[in-house]
Image (cartoon, rainbow, N blue to C red):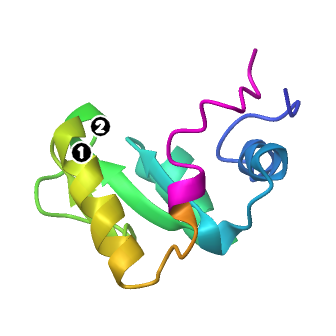
Amino acid sequence: MSGKAKPSPEPFLLVMQLLGVSANETMLVGDSIRRDIVPAKALGMIAVHAAYGDRNFHEGEQVGADCVIHGIGEVIGVVGGCHRRNQIPQLGRYFFPSHHKPFD
């Protein structure tokens, strides 16, 4: 949709624009340090490394991620923790955007 591939920032910027959020309101969960975590951090997002999906992951390394998860079930705890610390003050509005489907 943006005409660019990750790790270019354009795909991330497009999604934020479509959702009407800024980088400091956004948490990215990605399984690639190079294609997901590095560009997300460069844009100012909270970055969660999904180590369970990364074939190049070395156990115990965060490599710039704010945290590492080892299964999808851990995402809710990470979201709740960041929201309580006011790292993502309005995340609740966008976590399950059933009213907004930008990729249809």
Q: How many marks?
A: 2
Most prominent secondary structure in the magenta stretch? loop
Query: Secondary structure beneath disc 1?
Result: helix
- Is residue 102 visible to the viewer in this orientation of the structure? yes
* Magenta segment includes 100: yes
Left or right placement of residue 15 versus residue 84 in this view: right
Start-end of magenta stretch: 92-104
Depth check: give the residue in front, 21 or 48: 21
Query: Secondary structure beneath disc 2?
Result: loop
Rendered location of residue 8, percent (x, y): 74, 48
Badge number at residue 54: 2
The residue located at (34%, 79%) in the rendering is 84
Left or right placement of residue 17 versus residue 29 in this view: right
Residue that sits furthest to the bottom in the current view:
85
Badge number at residue 51: 1
Residue that sits furthest to the left in the current view:
59
The residue located at (82%, 35%) in the rendering is 4
Q: Amino acid at mark 2?
A: Asp
**Can you say whether 26 is above or below 51 in the image?**
below
Quarter residue 100 falls in: top right
Q: Residues within 10 Å of mark 2 (few under 14, many from 20)?
A: few
**Can you say whether 101 is above or below 57 in the image?**
above
- Quarter of the image with the N terminus is top right
- Is residue 38 visible to the viewer in this orientation of the structure? no
Q: Amino acid at mark 1?
A: Ala
Q: Are marks 2 and 1 in contact (CB under 8 Å)?
A: yes
Residue that sits furthest to the right in the current view:
3
The residue located at (47%, 80%) in the rendering is 87
Left or right placement of residue 92 versus residue 68 in this view: right
- Quarter of the image with the C terminus is top right
The residue located at (66%, 40%) in the rendering is 6
Query: Residues under labels 2 and 1: Cα distance?
Result: 5 Å
